[in-house]
Amino acid sequence: MRRVYLDNGATSYPKAPGVGEAMCHFITDVGCNIGRGGYQVAYDAAALVLETREQLNTLLHGPGSRNVIFTAGATASLNLLLKGLLRPGDRVLTTTMEHNAVLRPLTQLQKTGVEVVFLPCGADGALDLEECQARLSQGAAALVMSHASNVCGTIQPIGAVGTLCRRYGVPFLVDGAQTVGMVPVDMADMHIDALAFPGHKGLLGPQGIGGLILTGALARRIEPLLAGGTGSVSQSLEMPDFLPDKLEAGTLNLPGIYGLHAALSYLEREGATLRVHARKVGLHLWARLKELEYDGFRVTGTDDLSRRTGVVSVDFLKGDNGEMAFRLEQEYGIATRCGLHCAPTAHQTIGTYPQGTVRFSTGPFTTFEDMDYVQDAVWRLLTER
């Protein structure tokens, strides 16, 4: 049976060429730690880690390679950021379109006395900028939000929000899980103070590695979530006060970093072409599914094509979405994700709660032929009922 992988919103597949080989090389030929060994192999590994920081900082226009913190992924980065920054009595702004990687840490922090204020979004998932400005003018310890929805693919006006945050002196924290690698992100131009990202989605790297890039000013305000060995200032029982050591306790995921380095090197060569293709194929899928939209079936998210990622979620209004997703895979080999996508308030916002949606999410290796095949499969499911 034909296989069409359309769950890139969860993790990219296939990975960039060379990722597996780079990870295998570390495990079989390198194998050491960094910052803990005074020998050449350890020095060489440390140089590759530094080069990976530099690649990420260049790609995302960050404040410097030392400000790139490696974590287990975007969720770990957001927890480190939110729990290290916010204190009882603080007021934090977020939106109704967030993933649980933001919502669950904030819910935990609410129990400690942090006030969480939700900024409204429309039925297309787009943020209400006027309301955002009104809330920012009242002051906040931070505003945290996603660059794009993992549910419906709507891209938020991050640049405009960043400008407002800068105007009112509010730190701007961005969840880049759905955009980094495939949608341009410029931390300096967008006035982003902290950017959390995974390595395994748009960056085409392995699972288990991701990062956080943040300004030095914000880093000075963060209490480390983890404490432990860093290979530096070992005589002190306190965590170092400089980056990246302050926020990188313990052993780094070096196989993951080697894999991410290979993915970033591939993106340096092919990224522009891949991004153009990923955008075109995502919009092609959106257009094909919109052709089927009628009573009983709808495509969610914005119709403004300049503000869409390759995530296209649909609601089978006259059928069970779980059954439709199951049949797409069993009968047509099309892999999707069905349900609430770890974002219940987003589904409430766009009117798909509690049933959720069937999410198709394209990637840079998805083909136009696959999208036409998907349209035909969906049409068959719709017309036989």
Image (tube, grey):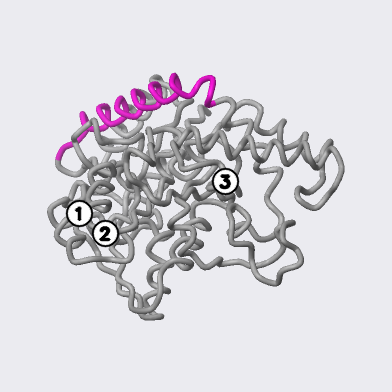
Marks 2 and 1: in contact by CB < 8 Å? yes
Is residue 56 rendered magenta in the image? no
Of 348 and 239, which appears nearest the observer?
239
Out of 140 and 146, give the one closest to the viewer: 140
| Picture layout, residue 26 above or below residue 121 | above
Q: Eyeballing the image, is 369 above or below 160?
A: above
- Residue drawn at x 65%, y 41% is 257
**Amino acid residing under circle 1:** Cys
Name the one closer to the observer, 282 or 249: 249
Residue located beneath label 3 in the image: 66
Which residues are the magenta region? 267-294
Location of residue 290 in the rendering, given as x and y in whole percent from the top left corner: 22, 32
Question: Looking at the picture, how far across and down is residue 296, in whole percent?
Answer: 19, 44
Observer able to see residue 79: yes
Residue found at x 38% / y 33%:
183
Circle 3 — which element? helix
Image quadrant of residue 25? top right
Q: Is residue 305 above or below residue 71?
A: above
Secondary structure type for disc 1:
loop
The amino acid at mark 3 is: Arg
Mark 3 and mark 2 lie on one chain; the one further toward the N terminus is: 3
- Give the Cα distance between marks 3 and 2: 33 Å
Q: Are marks 3 and 2 in contact (CB under 8 Å)?
A: no
Q: Between tags 3 and 1, which lies in front?
A: 3
Query: Badge 1: how crowded within 10 Å, few (<14), some, or many (20+)?
Result: many
Mark 1 and mark 2: span between their CA atoms?
A: 6 Å
Give the total of numbered labels: 3
Q: Which residue is mark 2?
A: 96
Q: Which mark is residue 121?
A: 1
Q: Tag 2 or tag 1, which sits nearer the N-term?
A: 2
Q: Nearer the viewer, residue 55 or 280?
A: 55
Question: Crowding at label 2, few (<14), some or many (≥20) Cα neighbours within 10 Å?
Answer: many
